[in-house]
Image (spheres, rainbow, N blue to C red):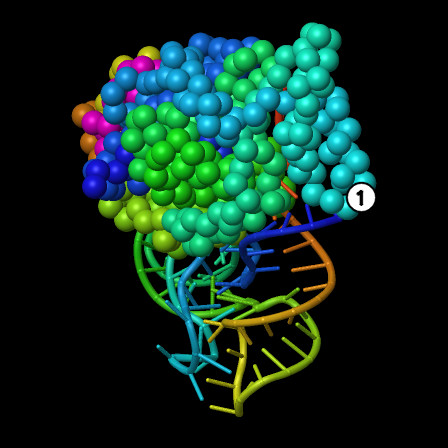
RNA sequence: GUCCCCUUCGUCUAGAGGCCUAGGACACGUCCCUUUCACGGACGCGACACGGGUUCGAAUCCCGUAGGGGACGCCA
């Protein structure tokens, strides 16, 4: 059986870490099994859905390297398909009209809660008489429609949570059609999952109760429910909801503001909450190969944003020039060559840091002219051009011999005079990058 | 309030009654390498939420307590 999955964001905002994790894990699962991964845009809420968000979601996924099969599907284009199913469900009585206003329903819930009862819909609409209905209609009320749940136990074998059971009595009949006649998420989602032959639904555990009602909907529509995998929600370092620092950032911000590499994000999101260690892989292959739902824990893991930054640094330290070059060109650093990259990359945390090192080598530096006598003496001992990787040792050996200095007293003043900083790349490789002219100039203040 | 899920080193976890003096990864510490940073290597620190049971024996099973997460929308 070919596995078919989908990622179904609603374009009502930017995609954040939590959503991105679901998108990624679903994708890894699909790719691991050589299955399909569909992108479905859940835009039934016309008020809040915006094309700019759809564009941002696609751009974010593409940047992350999460590709989908075929064209994206919009729910707003599928209204005819929904209408057919709606007619069937009305005909067989699974969809029934209700006339309560939102305020009345809120009141009912409040009253149940006050009596320590679960706020389940009382199905009052089912016992409405024709006269009462006519009275409501005369008032100008339009019905919304609920799906009538069967009073049977609902059980499924969740790929992550194991056997999940629900008592139908504790669930409210879900509203599937709004008063204005537009269909709601539950209805559209189930119909689409049937029509697109989705075999596995992967989503956050905030959907487990929905799944219970969806299973009855699948059955009411004559379909076999797919398999489900409900991911524990990721929580903040403080244990609360994801809300602070990187956890609240959109993909666009992770990319543009935080300057993170896609794989720095992916490595963390793919492995967080699993038994596999988080590693700095520079491609998806190892993540796809090792993917298995059984490795996910059932508890909510805490997300430490710093982990992404650490991984980002490691990825840059290991990055070959060929891979960095397109990025550097895009940043306008077309003059950076392999030698410069290899010299400087161990000191990078984020790609943009390279600009600072470029300026240290090429731009003017602000150094404090300490130890001027020593630096002056060292300047006169510089070997003649051309310089190579051995020049530094030649030079400092001579300086050591003539001045009697060694260790930190010898090297640190030189580093400071040459770079204006007390840390940085290996000076043996940095010196040739500076070249005789700049070196002389800096040594002379 | 009701229902569901979770609780092992700082963090992510392994662990499905004796293989556990509880294993790994990251972080942290010390040392080695080193002019610095980083890399690499070695070693180390460090946990079964609490209280009762069951059992010859419990991190593992049961009950309770506490803490955390989720759900209970004419949102998705």
Indicate whether residue A317 is drawn in magenta. yes
- Would you call the spot at circle 1 few (<14 residues within 10 Å), some (14-19), or many (20 or more)? few
Q: Helix, strand, or loop for circle 1? A: loop
A315 lies left or right of A320: right
Residue B32, horizontal then vertical, whole percent = 36, 61
In this rendering, would A221 be left or right of A175? left
Magenta segment's dominant SS is helix
In depth, the one of A172 and B43 nearer the eye is A172
Please determine whether, in this image, residue A35 is positioned above or below residue A278: above
Dividing the picture into quarters, in which one does residue A444 lie? top left
Could you tell me if residue A365 is visible in this image? no
Which residue is located at x 46 percent, y 38 percent?
A: A216
Residue at horizontal 72%, vertical 13%? A135
Quadrant housing residue A436: top left
Name the foreground residue: A383 vs A58.
A58
Residue B3 left/right relative to A382: right
Residue A414 coordinates in the image, percent (x, y): 41, 34
- Image quarter for residue A198? top left
Q: Which residue has dot 1 on it? A: A115
Task: Please state the horizontal and vertical placement of residue B65, each as a whole percent of the image.
Answer: 73, 63
How many numbered markers are drawn?
A: 1
Task: Give the residue at x 63% y 29%.
Answer: A126
Which residues are the magenta region?
A: A316-331
**Residue A396 part of the magenta-drawn span:** no
User: Pointer 1 indicates a residue of which chain?
Assistant: A
Q: Residue at x 44, y 10 (%)?
A: A51
């Amino acid at each position: 059986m070919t596995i078919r999955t989908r990622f179904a964001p609603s374009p009502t905002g930017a995609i954040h870490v939590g959503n991105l994790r679901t998108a990624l894990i679903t994708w890894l699962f699909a790719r691991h099994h050589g299955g399909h991964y569909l992108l479905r845009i859940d835009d039934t809420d016309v008020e809040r859905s915006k094309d700019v968000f759809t564009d941002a979601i696609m751009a974010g996924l593409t940047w992350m390297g999460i590709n989908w099969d075929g064209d994206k599907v919009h729910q707003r284009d599928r209204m005819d398909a929904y209408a057919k199913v709606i007619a069937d469900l009305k005909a067989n009585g699974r969809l029934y009209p209700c006339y309560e206003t939102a305020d009345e329903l809120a009141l009912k819930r409040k009253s149940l809660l006050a009596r320590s009862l679960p706020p389940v819909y009382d199905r009052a609409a089912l016992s409405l008489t024709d006269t009462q209905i006519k009275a409501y209609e005369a008032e100008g009320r339009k019905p919304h429609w609920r799906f009538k749940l069967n009073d049977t136990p609902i059980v499924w074998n969740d790929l992550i949570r194991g056997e999940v059971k629900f008592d139908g009595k504790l669930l409210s009949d879900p509203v599937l059609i709004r008063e204005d006649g537009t269909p709601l998420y539950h209805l559209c989602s189930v119909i689409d999952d049937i029509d697109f032959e989705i075999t596995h639904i992967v989503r956050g555990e905030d959907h487990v109760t929905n799944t219970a009602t969806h299973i009855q909907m699948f059955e009411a529509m004559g379909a076999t429910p797919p398999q489900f995998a409900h991911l524990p929600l990721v929580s903040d370092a403080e244990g609360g909801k994801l809300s602070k620092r990187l956890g609240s950032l959109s993909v666009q911000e992770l990319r543009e503001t935080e300057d993170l590499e896609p794989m720095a994000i992916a490595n963390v999101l793919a492995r967080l909450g699993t038994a596999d260690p988080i590693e700095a892989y520079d491609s998806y292959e190892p993540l796809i190969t090792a993917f298995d739902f059984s490795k996910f824990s059932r508890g909510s893991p805490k997300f430490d944003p710093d982990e992404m930054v650490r991984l980002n640094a490691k990825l840059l330290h290991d990055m070959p020039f060929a891979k960095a070059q397109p990025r550097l060109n895009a940043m306008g650093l077309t003059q950076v060559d392999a030698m410069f990259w290899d010299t400087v990359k161990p000191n990078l945390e984020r790609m943009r840091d390279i600009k600072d090192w470029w300026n240290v080598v090429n731009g003017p530096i602000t150094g404090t002219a300490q130890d001027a006598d020593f630096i002056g003496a060292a300047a006169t001992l510089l070997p003649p051009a051309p310089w190579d990787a051995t020049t530094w040792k030649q030079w400092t050996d001579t300086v050591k011999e003539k001045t009697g200095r060694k260790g930190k007293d010898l090297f640190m003043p030189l580093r400071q005079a040459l770079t204006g900083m007390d840390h940085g790349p290996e000076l043996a490789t940095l010196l040739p990058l500076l070249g005789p002219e700049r070196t002389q100039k800096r040594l002379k203040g």
